[in-house]
Image: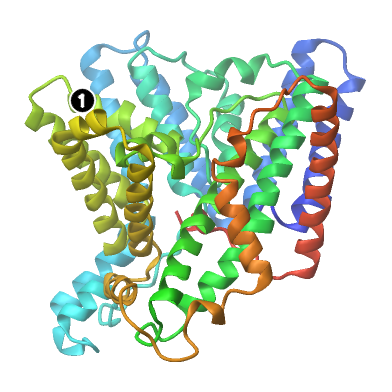
Amino acid sequence: MVFSSLLFLLCFLPLCLGAYYVIPCFFKGRTEEHRLQNSILLTFSILFYAFGGVKYLALMLFVILLNWAGGFSVSKKRHKDGARKFFLVLVILLNIGIIFFFKYFNLFTAVLETLLFPELATGGRAVNLWTLTGNGALGWPEVVLPIGISFYTFQAMSYVIDVYRDEAQLQTDIFKFALYISFFPQLIAGPIVQYRDIERQLSARQESVDRFAAGIRRFTFGLAKKVLIANTLGEMVDTIWALDLTKIGASAAWLGAIGYTFQIYYDFSGYSDMAIGLGKMFGFEFKENFNYPYQSVGITDFWRRWHMSLSYWFRQYVYIPLGGNRGSQLATYRNLFLVFLLTGIWHGANWTFFIWGVAYGILIIFEKAVLKDLYDRFRIKTLIRLVTFFIVTILWIVFRADNILLAKTFISRLFMKGSEGFNALSFLTGKRLITLILAILCAGIIQKIPLSRKSRIVKLATGVFTLVLFALSIIFLVNGTYNPFIYFQF
């Protein structure tokens, strides 16, 4: 179930909100009310995840139990430092082992089959390695990736590490901890929420009409970004990528590349907006996950603005423990490279993600070592933004491709003439052109227009605009069948 589905919008969410706000009215006492509300949210969260596959619900519950028990094992008040460190390493290795098995076992199998049985390789050993085309010689069954495993496992690990560092309180109530991990707004695709940020909200949070209204607005804006922009661009992008890429010309290739650049932004940031909005409806406050990344001045700035919860996680639990920038310049560069290597690997078991992460690591090191002084000296922000957008767009091609050979072909077509009938005009309808223009304007340009948020006219216009966006989104969902979500595969 996705937030942008009619089942969620018209059935699941109204039932959950109704139960959350109506049932506690029959009980007295704020403490009992919050305990009951937590139980309602936990029940609906488990039902929400069960729609993605009941058999993987047991895995999520195991991760919850493992890390809840892990918190006791690493608590400063319960064990000595030697035992705490041992249990910390054990819990982290078990979490990583779960992620490795479900995300990377198929890659491991494909590589092993190609190396051990090269005679069965259909396109040759090198091609099979690059495309991860296994030959089935080992007969091992393919492992299906559970939805959201990377997100909720990282959340669980951050709790254990923070308890070990004494930066978060030990949670003795397993049901509150289970709600922290499984809370449906951020369960599937983040933002990655740290326990210390919401531990008080699990026990005492304040719902209000203003916060609920803000949540509705935020959710609706995210829904519109996903349904009206990302889905429209996604249909066009998928059509281009489904073609024989050796025949498309530069205009079609650039349309596909730029279209995907905006599709993934509106798809993912829209989902994050919906998650943050849903949190507000239930009295929770989540941190922002995006800050207009296509307005970035440089690659480093881009990663301060893109998927900020993931960047912050790697900074807190990988970069700083490795030494951060406290050591030599060479050590700092090494730490940066390892962080982005792991960022690429986190996204999936494909050489494309590996190369995507390595490329960003190299670019950020080069930027810090060579370009930083030039940025400060010349301050040509518009030019730097354009160059940054160009680099990000090229790397999104690598990210989008099924394998690295396909990415290489697509990138080469950006600078080649194609066959007749395979140019941009073949795919750019009026609706798609308007959507693309809106995508560009809403990526940080319109938001710079100064408006007084306290103005009654602005408030009224915002309310009307929110209703119109919601109605349009519902109409698009009723009339359309295309509604994927890119980050479900991570």
Q: How many marks on residues?
A: 1
Compared to residue 237, the image places residue 104 above or below, namely: above
Q: Is residue 115 above or below residue 228?
A: below
Q: Point out the residue furthest to the right here.
A: 26
Q: Judge from the rendering whether residue 186 lies leftward or rightward of residue 210; answer left or right.
A: left
| Image coordinates for residue 21, horizontal then vertical, percent | 84, 28
Of residues 273 and 170, the one nearer the viewer is 273
Q: Quadrant of the N terminus?
A: bottom right
Tell me the residue at 31%/13% (across/down): 79
The percent position of residue 473, horizontal first and vertical second, equals: 76, 55
181 up-or-down from 58: above or below: above
Q: Is residue 110 found left or right of 250 in the rendered image? A: left
**Which residue is rendered at x = 7% and y = 32% of the image?**
330
* Image quadrant in which you'd find residue 70: top left
Q: What is the x, y in percent for residue 172?
A: 53, 18
Q: Which amino acid type corresponds to the residue marked 1 in the rendered image?
A: Gly
Report the residue marked by disc 1: 324
Query: Between residues 169 and 124, which one lies in front from this camera angle?
Result: 124
The quarter holding residue 122 reads bottom left
Quadrant of the rendered image containing residue 311: top left
* Location of residue 444 in the rendering, given as x and y in whole percent from the top left corner: 54, 40
Q: Is residue 230 at least partly visible in the picture?
A: no
